[in-house]
Amino acid sequence: MGPLDESRMMDPSPKVLDAIRFVLVETTHSGNLGAVARAMKTMGLRRLDLVNPRSSPDAEAVARAAGADDLLATARTHRALVDALRGCRLVVGSSARPRTVEWPLLEPADCARRLLAEAREGEVALVLGRERSGLTNEELARCHFLTRIPTDPGFSSLNLAAAAQIFAYEIRRAWRADAEPPPVASGWDPAPPEVLEGFHAHLAQTMVDTGFCDPAQSRKLRQRLRRLFNRARPDRVELNILRGILSAAQGRKTPARFRKTDSPTDSRGQAAEVSEE
Ligand code: SAH
């Protein structure tokens, strides 16, 4: 893990999201302004900049914002894109179409990670284009990267706010991945190896007792079963249930015998303790 990663681990603050601005260029429909505000706010983003909007944040915008109209109220309006990008160290432009001139292209998830990483150092922007024509080549040329949401090649243009939602969600996902340790189901305590050994021994003995096979003869079978239970990572209660079933299959159910099979097995994981009973 490099120094950048470490600093990211130590900074789970939502403040970093405030360094990310969405810049809408010449948006025609006021409803889209509201819908973008909503898309952003649901994901914890607040900074909205409008370049020459063709409609003002009117009642339709407020209705579509559905409670995110505070973002419309604090949105800043600019006459030119360069003004909206002032102070930004990184600018990513979004486009539905591949452009004739090759430009570094990011997948939405990589775009989100890069925006976040640089937002820890300064201001960054994602630029979204006009409903009809997107961004001009001159506007895209001001961007360090382009990003495109992969779509059906024959129908690539999302509604402006739908595109904004996808980018905002990817940013939140990337932010959460940094801010939170990988999710572990709470209250889940996988059984320790010695308990699992007891289970495998019991399972092996049951296979012999029931006439299924003698696993001592097949390394492959033993490995497959190990792999299965390592993948599932059962907890003690789950193993106890399985062992109850094994005991029943063996024709014995008394708790005393049940406990006895928990005792440590030898290094080969043999079922000696179980079979003694
Ligand atoms: N015909 C326009 C589509 C405009 S849709 C074009 O070719 O770009 C309005 C805006 O939504 C786009 O400018 C872009 O910012 C965003 N958008 C729509 N679909 C997108 C996609 N598949 N990938 C990235 N951005 C997209």
Image (cartoon, rainbow, N blue to C red):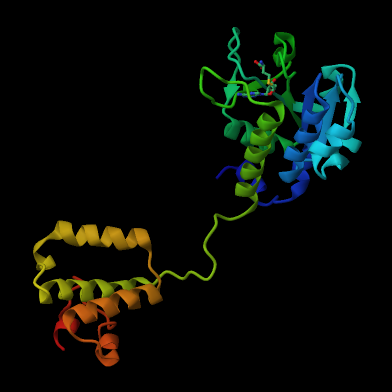
* Residue appearing at x 64%, y 25% in the figure: 158
Residue 96, image x and y in percent? 62, 19
Which image quadrant for residue 229? bottom left
* Residue appearing at x 89%, y 22% in the figure: 78
Q: Report the quarter where the N terminus lies.
A: top right
Front in this rendered view, residue 7 or 208: 208
Residue 66, image x and y in percent? 80, 43
Front in this rendered view, residue 153 or 99: 153
Q: How many marks?
A: 0
Residue 159, image x and y in percent? 68, 26
Q: Report the quarter where the C terminus lies.
A: bottom left
Front in this rendered view, residue 220 or 209: 209
- 214 w.r.t. 45: above or below: below
Which image quadrant for residue 265? bottom left
- Judged from the image, the quadrant occupied by ligand 1 is top right
Residue 40, image x and y in percent? 74, 39
Residue 156 horizontal side relative to residue 256, left or right = right
Front in this rendered view, residue 268 or 103: 103
The answer to whether any part of residue 194 appears in the image is no
Residue 30 horizontal side relative to residue 101, left or right = right
* Residue appearing at x 67%, y 32% in the figure: 162
The answer to whether any part of residue 203 appears in the image is yes
